[in-house]
Image (cartoon, rainbow, N blue to C red):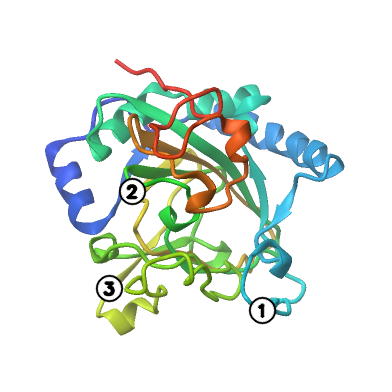
Amino acid sequence: MSTIRTSPLTAQEILNFSQKGFLMPGQIFSTDTIESMRYSLAKAQEAERVAGREYDLLDPEAWPTKEKESHSQPGKKVGFLFNLWLHNKEWRQFCFNPTLARWASQLIGSRKIRLLEDNALYKAPRAGGELKWHQDHPYWPLAQPNSVTVWLALDDVYLENGSMQMAVGSHLLGERLPAAFGTGTPYLSEKRPKWIKPVQDPQSEGLETEVIDIKAGEVSIHHSLTWHASGPNNTDHPRRAAIARYVGDGTIWLGSDRYEYNYSDEEVGIGIGEPISGKYFPLVPFL
């Protein structure tokens, strides 16, 4: 019988994370909670679709590459929803879970933690596509990579249905350019320092990769500079995930000077060069 973990991370886990750039600390939600989140996600998908807020991460129009590309994976899609915590009870309970916040605090090294955003990802049976190698930090308007991503499996995830792959130790190589998820085409080279290069195939950098197979209710956590990718869903069942991104309190907001985020500078109300704060980036309490 599996046990819901509430204990802090051990010193060995923190060391492993610092060296590898990711961690699988175990199960944190019960079967009943996961089933409730699946049901909540289905309702949210319909509501967001009607409101025009359901996105496809493989849509070439979603990415500001210099030249618009054709769809690299015809017939495939990766559904994406943003910040469900604002109006969804189940997602709010997930994002504000004190154990997750404590783990984020331990890994980032910050006494206080803020929620940067949440996401839902959906790979439909036989139609869920592949996400190319990328980091998370390049897509965020933050001065420092003081952030981690928590990835909660809502279904058992394995290679055949699109498990994540991590490039071991890649976070130690520094920031790379953002890239279109469906094609891997880099962009924003004109706004980033010239020494920041695209993400490569990990093998070309001499990096080992590790497949992240996890059960529903378990989480993985990765550094915002860790290279990761995921494969297509080649099964007859959906592959669903809930994601929370946590950032250390005091991290500096660079806004549109760095990246055009989902909220405008005016909406967030944070001055360029000021610490992240405000209603969209709340503190997440933990003991």
Front residue of 85 and 45: 85
Q: Please provide percent x and percent y for residue 36.
A: 64, 29
Q: Which residue is mark 1?
A: 67
**Residue at screen point 49% across, 51% down:** 257
| Quarter residue 102 falls in | top left
Quadrant location of the N terminus in the rendered image = top left
Kindly identify the amino acid type of the residue bearing the numbered disc 3. Answer: Glu
Residue 153 — which label? none
Whether residue 4 appears in this view of the structure is: no
| Earlier sequence position, callout 3 versus callout 1 | 1
Answer left or right for 66 relative to 29: right
Mark 1 nearby-residue class (10 Å; few <14, some 14–19, many ≥20): few
Q: Which is more toward the observer, 220 or 190?
A: 190
Question: In the figure, is residue 117 to the left or right of 24?
Answer: right
* Residue at 77% over, 34% down: 43
**Answer yes or no: do the residues labelled 2 and 3 have beta carbons within 8 Å?**
no
Chain-order first, disc 2 or disc 3:
2
Residue at mark 3 to residue at mark 1: CA–CA distance: 32 Å
Q: Secondary structure at mark 2?
A: loop
Query: In the figure, 157 relative to 93: above or below?
Result: below
Residue 158 makes an appearance in the image: yes
Disc on the earlier residue, 2 or 1: 1
Q: Where is residue 267, by image quadrant?
A: top right
Instruction: Classify mark 3: helix, strand or loop.
Output: loop
Q: Comparing marks 2 and 3, which lies closer to the viewer?
A: 2
Q: Which residue is mark 2?
A: 145
Crowding at dot 2, Cα within 10 Å, few <14 / some 14-19 / many 20+, comes out as many
**Dot 1: element:** loop
Mark 3 Cα-neighbour bin, 10 Å: few <14, some 14–19, many ≥20: few
Which residue position is annotated with label 3? 208
Q: Position of residue 265 (x, y in %)?
A: 58, 38
